Image: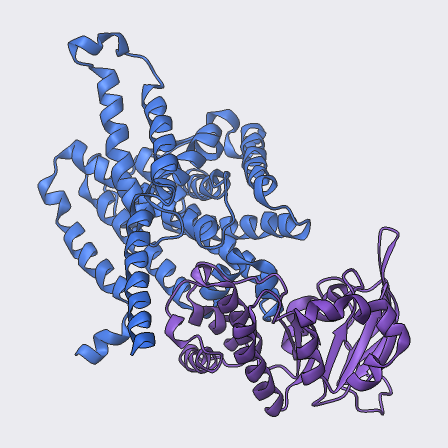
Amino acid sequence: MSVDTAASDGALLSIRGVTKTFSGLTALEDVSFEVQPGQIKGVIGPNGAGKTTLFNVIAGSFPPTAGEVLLRGKVVTGLPSHRIARAGIARTYQLMKPFGTLSVRDNVLIAALQRTGSMKEARVRAGDVVERVGLASWADDQAAGLSTAGRKRLELARALALEPDLLLLDEVLAGLVPSERAPVMELLAEIRRGGVTMLFVEHVMAAVMELSDEIVVLHHGQVLATGTPDQVTSDPAVVEAYLGEEQSDADA
Amino acid sequence: MTRLLGRVDPNYLVLAALAVALLFVPFFLEGAGVEVAVRILMFGMLATAWNVMAGYAGLFSFGHAAYFGLGAYSGAYLLVVHGLSPWIGMVVGMVLGAAFAAMTGFLSFRYKLTGAYFVLTTFAFAEMLRLIALNLDLVNGAVGFRVPIVRDATIWDLQFAPGSPAYYYVILGMLIVTLVVTIALTRSRSGYFIVAIRDNEDAAASLGVNPLRYKLLAVSVSGALTAAGGTFYFQFLFFIDPPIAFGAPISVEILLPAIIGGMGTLWGPLVGAALLVPLSELTSSLVRSPPGFLGFLEGRSGVDLMLFGALLVAIIIFLPRGVYGTIVDRIGVSKARKRGRQRQLEGAS
């Protein structure tokens, strides 16, 4: 399915002219941008801007209506999600999807098993990741019993255990109280130091500004602006479309 | 020694102990008792096979008669028409059962039939086979098959004197194999994937698990094991026809022990069979010769089924996770509470 194209720019992820319509409703319109290896890119935009749709297209939950997604220059558009995951893209879900009856460690084991054939080795790796995200004391508990904060960490742990080249984070901070955010922010900074490329959707502006190398602003399914956090926040169009109404939320 | 034991799944040890204990059961039972014991093990085995698909993979089947009947008819046809050993029929039946499960499963998964629609599909496929068998002269249509009596039958003929404990030992062996397959599967990488898909298919897929592949594995294993039980059933009861082999009643008899005992647990289906089969014997003997004050029940059919229904309703209300499943849950909860207290203590220090 994968086709080599002349991608000389070395981007890890290229989104090229992606459009997605749902029976007449345009969720994404001609969206294009690139993510360079090691880069942290934030995607922001008001509710309904198409952020989660974009993630679903990249992760293969459904194909785009038009346009293509390339990973390391290879077209991955239309591949089923399990193949995109194995190709190196891991995602977290905004609405957490734990394997409720499995233990926390076994949730992570499912991902670790993609990278090693040995059950024993996968268990060790899963245990390491569980410890890394701070869930070690809950490792043997059923995932269904975790709190919201715990489930967010579990989403992150599973994605990390897949050892992805690109991590798609869909609002990992949403729903957390400020005291719960700090350790997750530290964790994200640590993951970043480990060289994992990240594309993340986030409503918590302080986090976006702190973590992102670059920001893509989506508005009504279109790219409104791209640039560094400073460039984006000083763009009048962005301020009007998004930050003007959202800034007060972030301060609260 | 302890290091060796530490690596073995404790379930294997329980199974070994149980198997040894069950070896002696025929010595304490008379003819009819052995027959009841055979039925317990047989339905325990069938429900354990059903549980692989419905319990672990979350693919609720109301049509296991399809795989059961394929096993029963493979054995019957090859024995009666071609004179082949039921063991050969059993292997052929298992292949057919697995293939039919995979084929019908593929269609359901391909067209994303889930929940009630999936359940109805499994029922429809079993009905389809019943109607085919009913109208197919090759398998004697409505007449069905009878086991030809073999003089000096050996184990190869899978035929013994009525009430012989040999049937008991054969089905005990089949039950053990079914449980070993279940334990091995649930401990394997495939087994973890199957449960993950049951819990959340989208999440499993986005972690690199191919849902179609592992769902097909679960239905095929379940179909093959159920078919083996079907072949044994024919040899044990000496008779099969389309309604018995492919009808809804056998589908219900297969799934009921697993639900009563506890879906998605290893021992639940067998526990359920150990409760249900004697209960069914009791109710039917009650109907045959009721005590004076219940004289009006004499000869009425269906009373046992009414009792089954009432019991099922009671179980669903009071023990939604089944008899064994509820026990397992309670133990899990108390262990989790203990870990919770431990965390509090650590947090406090």
Chain letter tied to purple: A
Q: In which quadrant of the rendered image does the N terminus of chain A lie? A: bottom right
- Number of marks present in the image shown: 0
Task: Please state which of residues B143 and B51 is positioned toward the viewer in this rendering.
Answer: B51
Task: Please state which of residues B198 and B189 is positioned toward the viewer in this rendering.
Answer: B198
Residue A117 shows in the view: yes
Image quadrant where residue A226 sits: bottom right
Residue B218 pos. (x, y %): 49, 56
Question: In the rendered view, would you say B228 is above or below A50?
Answer: above
Residue A242 pos. (x, y %): 81, 68
Question: In the rendered view, would you say A187 is above or below B234?
Answer: below
Task: Please state which of residues B218 and B310 is positioned toward the viewer in this rendering.
Answer: B310
Q: Is residue B112 left or right of residue B228?
A: right
Residue B3 pos. (x, y %): 21, 80
Question: In the rendered view, would you say B61 is above or below A84?
Answer: above
Task: Please state which of residues A7 and B296 is positioned toward the viewer in this rendering.
Answer: A7
Chain letter tied to blue: B
Residue lying at 57% horizontally and 65% vertically, measured from the top left: B204
Residue B161 shows in the view: no
Question: In the rendered view, would you say B137 is above or below A200?
Answer: above
Residue lying at 59% horizontally and 50% vertically, measured from the top left: B105
Residue lying at 18% horizontally and 59% vertically, measured from the top left: B17
